[in-house]
Amino acid sequence: MIRNKLNIKHAIQRVNRHKLLTLSFWLCAAVLLILVVIPDDPDNGGVLTMKFTETGFIVHAAAYFVLFGLGVGAYPGALARLIPGVLLYGVACEAIQLFIPYRSFNPVDIAANVLGIGLFYVLYLLTKR
């Protein structure tokens, strides 16, 4: 009887962890999309005044590292779809900026997104061994 209770408790914890990771993944994606469309220039009414580099390379790499990591946790059996999905999301977010007058498209940001995804993927593979 005690063993059944422990198994049920463990199953509930797994479900709650999965729900939390899934919610976190989609919330992170939504926040990134919001950050793409709000002004980033303080002279233009922007709210984002802190940049680590001129292009925000480090910020992009870190953001997509986290987004992809949450995706791996939320959808562990879907790596084959998750990798291109998150990559395309990053390209789409950057492409949206072509149509926003106070934002600009920057292919270096896409490279940073790829780097963040790639770094997480390499760490993921190293820890799976």
Image: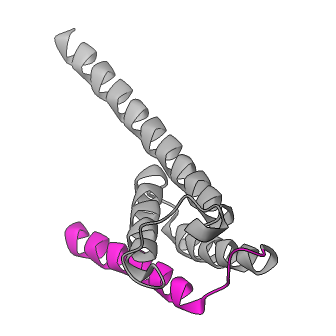
Query: Who is closer to the viewer here, 23 or 81?
Result: 23
Along the viewing direction, whichever of 128 and 50 lies nearer the viewer: 50
Quick check: 127 left or right of 69?
A: left
Q: Is residue 57 left or right of residue 10?
A: right
Residue at image x 54%, y 72%?
A: 80
**Would you place residue 30 above or below residue 2 in this image?**
below
Residue at 33% across / 29% down in the picture? 13
Image coordinates of residue 32 in percent, x first then y, are 57, 60
Q: Magenta residues, as a range?
A: 101-129
For the N terminus, the image quarter is: top left
* Front position in the image: 81 or 57: 57
Residue 45 in the magenta stretch? The answer is no
Q: How many marks?
A: 0
Measured from the top left, where is residue 66 in percent x and y?
40, 62
Residue located at (44% from left, 57% from top): 76
User: In terms of image quadrants, where is residue 16?
Assistant: top left
Q: Is 108 inside the magenta-drawn segment?
A: yes
Q: Which image quadrant: the C terminus?
A: bottom left
> Is 69 placed above or below 62 here?
above
Residue 22 falls left or right of residue 91? left
Magenta stretch, overall SS: helix
Residue 59 location, quadrant: bottom left
State the image coordinates of residue 14 (x, y, percent, origin top left). 36, 35
Which is more toward the observer, 57 or 71? 57
Looking at the image, is 57 positioned above or below residue 10? below
Q: Position of residue 67 (x, y in %)?
A: 46, 61
Q: Which quarter of the picture shows residue 62?
A: bottom left
